[in-house]
Amino acid sequence: MNDREIAEKIGESLSTVGMRRRRLGLKAHGRRLLFTDQQLIELHAQGLNDREIGEKLGANRSTVRDRRRKLGLKAHSHILLFTGQQLIDLHAQGLNDREIGEKLGVATMTVNVHRRRLGLKAIRKHMRA
């Protein structure tokens, strides 16, 4: 068994299994491919991004990304949740990040990050007792 298989079997993290194996002076067994190139190519052709492919194949997103790049496949972009103009318009209406998030159906932190990238100042609303 390789470290990943051992980790899954005993319910430990992969890094813990690897650390303990090295402490015991045991050599790692060869890595087994989590998925074939053909599986990756087929899912990529369906328009899935690295995260979605990883979820389907039980692999880390970075593993999928590295193999995709090795195969010369371009990344599929993430779905745009809202446009910068939508955020600007809602901000101009005097809405704060929480209110904008509710209108757009996204987390407050997502609004916060994109608002700052657009150079918009935070709108603070004081709670009344």
Image: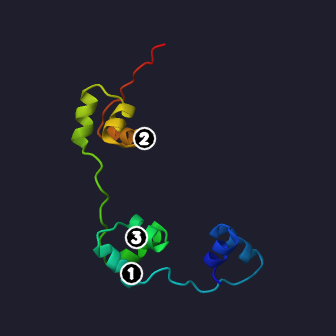
Q: Position of residue 24 (x, y in %)?
A: 78, 78
Which image quarter is the N terminus in?
bottom right
Secondary structure beneath dot 1 equals helix
- Residue at point 46%, 81% (across, down): 35
In this view, which residue lies farthest toward the right?
A: 24
Q: Which residue is mark 2?
A: 109
Mark closer to the chain start, 2 or 1: 1
Kindly report the distance in space between the C-alpha atoms of the residues bearing marks 1 and 3. Answer: 9 Å
Structural distance between the alpha carbons of marks 3 and 2:
26 Å
- Counting from the top left corner in percent of width and height, residue 84 is at 25, 42
Write the residue at 76% across / 74% down: 23
Disc 2 on helix, strand or loop?
Answer: helix
Among the two numbered marks 3 and 2 on one chain, the one whose residue lies closer to the N terminus = 3
Instruction: Return the x and y of residue 26 as percentages of the image width and height.
Output: 73, 83
CA neighbours of label 2 inside 10 A, class few (<14), some (14 to 19), many (20+)? few
Front one among 72 and 39: 39
Q: Nearer the viewer, mark 2 or mark 1?
A: 1
Q: Quadrant of residue 68?
A: bottom left
Circle 3: residue type:
Ile
Residue linked to disc 3:
53
Q: Residue 6: percent from the left, percent from the top?
A: 67, 77
Q: Nearer the viewer, mark 3 or mark 2?
A: 3
Residues at marks 2 and 1, CA–CA distance in whole angstroms? 35 Å
- Return the mark for residue 67: none
According to the picture, the residue beneath numbered tag 1 turns out to be 39
